[in-house]
Image (cartoon, rainbow, N blue to C red):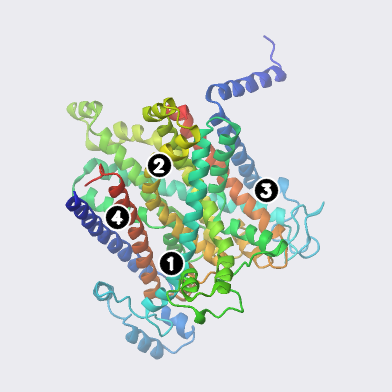
Amino acid sequence: MKKSLARYIIIRVLLTIPMVFILLSIVFVVLRVMPGDPVSSMLGGHAPEKVIEQKKEELGLNRSLPVQYVQYLWHVCHLDLGESMVFKEKVTKAISDKLPATIELTFFAMIITLFMGVFLGAYAADKRRTTQDYGIRLYGIVVYCIPVYWMGLMLQLIFGIWLNVLPVAGRVGARIFTSDFEKTGLYVLDTIMAGDFASLGDVLLHLVLPAFTLGIVLSGIFVRLTRANMLDVLKSDYILAAEARGIPHRKIVYKHALKNAFIPVLTMMGLQFALLMAGAVLTETTFSWPGMGRLLLERIYLRDYPTIQGIIIVVALVVALASLVVDVVYAMVDPRVRY
Amino acid sequence: MKYSPAAGMARLISGFTGLGRKYGLEWWILVIGALIILAIVYMAAFPGTIAPFSPYNQDTGPQLAPPSAVHFMGTDNLQRDVWSRIVFGSQTILRVAVLAALVSSIVGITLGLISGFSGGWFDKVLSLIMDSLYSFPGLILAIAFAAMLGPGVINIMLAVAVIYIPTYFRLVRGQTLSIKEDLFVEAAKAIGASRFTILWQYIFPNVIATTAVVFTLNVADAIMTEAALTYLGLGLPPSIVDWGMDLAMGKKFLPSGHWWLITFPGVMISLLALGFTMLGEGLAEILNPRLLER
């Protein structure tokens, strides 16, 4: 039993390698075909020919594409994502500086999404074909169609400008020095470990709007998924049996049925992680949140190939890891799942 | 029987409500979605009939004026009429989203058919590539493509199209795999139909029906991706009127409380996406009666 689970995990890990490789190759080719190169955007359009050639030589850009490709792959295999072409810094450093901000944002957004989605979905299924059900289903559809950045702007307008109760940009206020507590880059964790509860309050306050923006927009999908699964579960015989035994209705719905309906929802969570990352890019731009999404956009304008490639790899890995974790949890919860 | 417009209208309405009674809520979701789309398509087709100003006119009234009787969605920092820009902007987003969905459906369906039908290593490699693309956040990929291609309507359309190809590929390939085992395909082979005939006349018609719903939902998604790209400043030159770009422009005036610059373009993007989603949802539930039990 234990052995087959281990085997399953190993197979799943091996399966993520081709995915990362394919994405990397696509991005590598796509970036090289791009009009405009990093050297001219770095030196300005009027640099003399000789300087440009020299810089290209330095960066290895004048070698043939296949050679560059093989070299790059070789470095990646050694966990070296290269050096930024625009700034003098390691790509891994640039990414590891920004990754925690994105993780913190997506983590809290996911919690909000799950809570709202699962409970609204379960409630709607319980009250099937009533006004509450139609209302919640409408919420699910409407919320799915709201662009996440627009939701962010509207929340900024309402809570940041009109009511003036929540900060609209950044991770901490101007008077907080992050160097006082920064260790992992996950500020919530850092401030708790440092015992700095004043800063913790500030950090959480800054998290409210971005996390709710992302969380609310994604909750629509979970409402639908949970509702659909709950309807199936509520029709099953063991629910009827529980009902017959006189177990309180509320307990049946939110304890017995929800537990079973949650398993398929959990598997979908892996797929939704891609949506979450895409949403994070947009949320970060709207809230000036210093994460990976903002880094990606900044570097795309500068044509900083290695950093862009690095970010794509890390996003692919994060998504793959998320779906791996979800699948493994699923396999542990439901022993019928095996390769 | 004498024809009267009133009777015709009454019949039409009773036909509508009859369908409504048969299919319930789903029918009304479909109708409302279709009405939203029709209204915005009208906007895009005949902008001159409803827009009071040219979208480029920089002399329509005061600067940054709140909504009023003349400018019922206000004016922007360049004294342009927000409502007129919304009306003309509908052309860009509709064109890009629908064309992108068309391109990706054509490419995706073709590849899916061939891949599912031929099998072998070609199928394996293509499936692996498509699955990798599918599991990656589409928007991030679209950002990279849009940046690569540079600004332009065709370019942004392609950037959006690329990320939806795997959706169609996976759907069509899966169906092709099961349909090609069916008896009627066997029969076609027996009477000596060519591979192309089997694919085009036997399998394709059976696959295309299910893609209709996916296509509608895909347009809704493409609308949001297009708006996201232009909001991020990728994809379109500033001379084109576009809702996402207007939103990005309005963002600068958010701290000073000029709410009309961000509210209206955002409402329109949501509404258009909502129209296509409702149409798709309605279609899905009506075409698939098993779902109606829910």
Per the image, label 3 sits on a secondary structure element best described as: helix
Amino acid found under the numbered disc labelled 4: Ile
State which chain disc 2 sits on.
A
Who comes first in sequence, dot 1 or dot 4?
4
The disc placed on residue A259 is 2
Q: Position of residue A264 (x, y in %)?
A: 37, 43
Q: Position of residue A228 (x, y in %)?
A: 44, 37
Residues beneath discs 2 and 3 located on the same chain: no
Real-space Cα separation, disc 2 to disc 3, in angstroms:
53 Å
Residues beneath discs 1 and 4 located on the same chain: yes
Q: Position of residue B75 (x, y in %)?
A: 75, 60
Who comes first in sequence, dot 3 or dot 4?
3
* Residue identified by numbered label 3: B47
Real-space Cα separation, disc 3 to disc 4, in angstroms:
42 Å
Nearer to us: label 4 or label 2:
2
Rate crowding at label 3 as few (under 14), some (14 to 19) or many (20 or more) other CA atoms within 10 Å: many
* Residue identified by numbered label 4: B129
Real-space Cα separation, disc 4 to disc 2, in angstroms:
35 Å
Q: Are marks 2 and 3 in contact (CB under 8 Å)?
A: no
Real-space Cα separation, disc 3 to disc 1, in angstroms:
32 Å
* Residue identified by numbered label 1: B148
Q: Are marks 4 and 2 in contact (CB under 8 Å)?
A: no
Q: Position of residue B44 (x, y in %)?
A: 62, 47
